Each structure stands twice: as structure tokens, then as C-alpha cells.
Image (cartoon, rainbow, N blue to C red):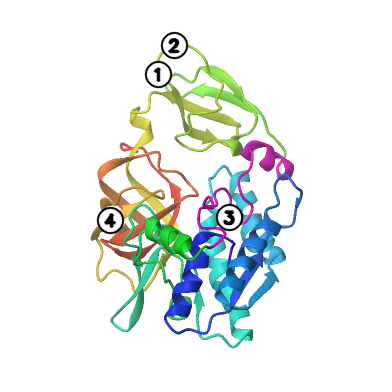
Amino acid sequence: MSGGVDSSVAAYLLKESGYDVIGLFMKNWEEDDEAEYCAAEEDLAYANGVCKLLSIPLRTINFSHEYWERVFSNFLSEHQAGRTPNPDILCNKEIKFKEFLEFANTLGADFIATGHYVRRGQQNRKYTLLSGIDNNKDQSYFLYTLQQNALKRSLFPLGDYLKEDIRQIASDLSFPNHDRKDSTGICFIGERKFKQFLSVYLPPKPGEIRNLEDDEVIGKHDGLMYYTIGQRQGLGIGGSGEAWYVADKDLSRKILYVVQGRNDPYLLRSHIYANQVHWVAELPPRLPYACQAKIRYRQDSQSCTLSRVGSGTLKVEFDQPQWAATPGQSIVLYDYDKCLGGGVIVNAMEPNE
């Protein structure tokens, strides 16, 4: 029970289905709890109000240490290495579907449930992860790392609903959070001025901004960790012509390479490589294997072919070149509405390599 509308309606739907429901509020961040950022008290108040309306108990637990050790430290090290991590994916793996599940065991719970817009299925005696029916809210991209033991014990009451239906249910029930804005920003940390926030934990390392086409110095940057592939805002490069986009990084020389124009060929990739590969239910029956993939959340699924390159590394070749494939982000694989699994992008080679 996060205090948001999704988990609140999920609790209601479970209770209506006959489950004995216990709410659990997790606090996972304490590093800079101050009035400007800390919304935990407000979140807890909303969760408590909904639980009272539903006549269900609410428990609270603090996973701040686990979050720091398993999620945030990785977030920092990845940025330090010049990559762009996705902490929401790791948070789901290590906190929501590990620590939360283990705590639920101590309560004697049969299942855990969340407000994610996904569905659970079964095939060949394995549990599968299916996209939510609301294409605008489907969150399977963030859950591709789930293990079978977690899927077996997880319920997703919202997977068959549209977001607008969930808000209507909350409004009809007079939930105090029925029109509350959805949470955004870093998982459990919230919206931040990213550059300012990151500089608290990682010292800035300034360097040059160079035009990738001719290696000409055209600006200065405060640190490669503040930029991601395809980024347009915050470069501070003037001049005429099309906008500039981040295209590459040279960590050893602290150089940020940029190109002019969104359609510059260097921003397009016909294939990428990924490691830390995880399959939700089972491996593809054969390789090469035709399926679909997303290299970012809310992207439409893209047709591709999988092949293996070395131990634990997957090569993904796209039918159409993809824009701004970003090391550190996840590529998530699908067979239409079934999430097969995914991996972390390690590099995105030039089409001519």
C-alpha cells in the first residue's frame, strides 16, 4: 500500500474477491528525509485512510538498508561507469518481489499483491508474465527479472483493467487518493533535480563536449554521469542548425560526444548486445529466434531476432534500426503479450562496426 490509487484499488478488488487482505506500507529511503523531498508521511496517511475505509489492517516496514545496498549502490556505480541504469527494475527484483515476499512469509501470507498493470498466466507448468490490457500503463517492462517462485506467489489485480476504470472505482468508493497524481522519478526516492541529486553522491568530473563528426571541441560538461544517449536538453551548445544530441562517451578521456540532428545515423542501431539475461519461464526453443523487443518503457514492441554471442551474452538484431539504444538500460523481450525476459544493454555497436 504505497498511498497511491493503484495499490489502494488492488486491495479493494482482492477483498471483494474473498481474500483476507493485509496492507503493507514500505519505507525504503531515509538518506535525505527533509520537507522538500520526503513524502513518506503523506503517503502513509493516504494508505492508512484507504485501509480504514476497507476495514483492513495496515503494517509498516522499513527496507531502507536493503534498498541502499541492493538498489541505490548499483545506481551510483552504473552512473559512475558512464551507463544509465534503471533502478525501478532492480527495485522490483530486490525489494518488492524479494524482501516484501520474505516479510509476507513471516505474516503467514499465501500471496503478495501489487498495483502493477500486468497479468499472470500459466504455460507448460510454468508461470508466465503477460502485458496488462491497458497499453498506456502496461508495466511488464519493469518486471522481466521476476523468478518463478515470486510469480507463483504474486497477484496482479489490475492487469485486466484500464487506468481510467481504476480511478473511477476509487472515486466511487470515495478514496481520498482517487485523483492523486501518479508517482514519478527514481523508485522510492521520487522526483529530483537529477544533476543536483547525483552530485551529492558522485563528485563531478568536468570534460569536453566534442562533435563526433570532426572531433572539434564545441563545449564543456560537468560530468559524463549527468548525460544519457539521445539526450538533447542541458547540453549548453548554441549555434545555428538542428539540435545537438548525446551520441557517445569516452570515460578515459572524459569526453562527451554529440551529433547534430535527431536522425543522425550514429544514433541508430541495427543490433545491440545484452548481458545479465533472464528468462521469465523458459528459454526460447531455438536460436536464432524471432520475437519482439523494447529498449525503453512505453516504446512500441519492435520486431527482432535473437542469437547468442558467448556465455551469457545475447545479440538482438532489429528489423528496423532503433534510436538511442542506451548502455545500462534494459532490453525486454516479448512474444506478443507474453514477456519472455530480457537483459541489460552493454553496448550498441555502429551498423558498420
Q: Quadrant of the N terminus?
A: bottom right
Q: Main secondary structure of the magenta part?
A: loop
| Cα distance between the residues tagged 1 and 2 | 7 Å
Q: Which residue carries the number 3 mark?
A: 187
Q: Which residues are magenta?
A: 175-202
Contact (Cβ within 8 Å) of mark 2 with mark 3: no
Q: Residue at x 34, y 58 (%)?
A: 134
The percent position of residue 81, horizontal first and vertical second, equals: 59, 45
Q: Find residue 4 and report its image quarter.
A: bottom right
Q: What element does badge 3 sit on?
A: loop
| Cα distance between the residues tagged 2 and 4 | 39 Å
Q: Residue at x 76, y 49 (%)?
A: 34
The percent position of residue 137, horizontal first and vertical second, equals: 39, 55
Residue reaching furthest bottom? Answer: 108
Q: Residue at x 57, y 19 (%)?
A: 219
The percent position of residue 98, horizontal first and vertical second, equals: 57, 73
Residue 292 circle label: 4
Residue 103 circle label: none
Q: Nearest to the eye among marks 1 and 3: give it.
A: 3
Q: Which residue carries the number 2 mark?
A: 240
